Amino acid sequence: MPTCKSCGIRWSWKQTMKASWKFSGAMNCPHCQSSQYATPKSKQRMTYINWLVLLPLPFSTIWDIPLSYTIMMMSSLIIVDLSLIPKMIELSNEQKPLW
């Protein structure tokens, strides 16, 4: 779970999920209200995890897997993805570019 770089308090899973759904880059610490940003490294890791959700699509086409099984596999991967997001986020006090 991420730890605020300003106050040093660790966020809970629920607080992390709530903060990570913001469209702006800043996530506010639930304890000290300072702006926190996901590090470029953690953004890259989350992108890789999100792409795993699409992994069943080419295999379902190649091996002719029924659509219902493909949807079930993708649904289970979405659940795994959502449960891993809070564990992947690392925080920083400043917003850094991805490159």
Image (cartoon, rainbow, N blue to C red):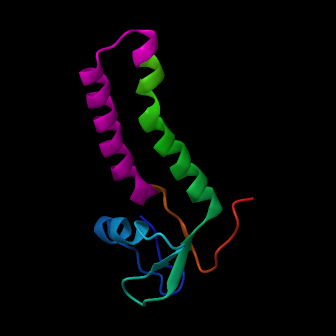
Q: Specify whether residue 66 is painted magenta.
A: yes
In the rendered structure, which segment of residues is drawn in magenta? 60-87
Q: Residue 86 versus residue 70: which sits nearer the camera? A: 70
Q: Residue at x 30, y 44 (%)?
A: 79
Position of 46 relative to 14 (above/below): above
Query: Residue 18: image x %, image y %?
Result: 34, 70
* Chief SS of the magenta region: helix
Query: Residue 42: image x %, image y %?
Result: 57, 58
Where residue 70 sits, quadrant-wise, is top left
Position of 47 relative to 17 (above/below): above
Q: Residue at x 37, y 68 (%)?
A: 16
Q: Residue at x 33, y 72 (%)?
A: 15
- Residue farthest toward the top in the current orientation of the protein: 63
Q: Residue at x 57, y 57 (%)?
A: 43
Q: Residue 3 versus residue 95: which sits nearer the camera? A: 95
Relative horizontal placement of residue 95, taking residue 62 as reference (left or right): right
Relative horizontal placement of residue 65, taking residue 23 as reference (left or right): left
Quadrant holding the N terminus? bottom left
Numbered circles on residues, count = 0
Position of 7 relative to 46 (above/below): below
Query: Residue 37: image x %, image y %?
Result: 55, 73
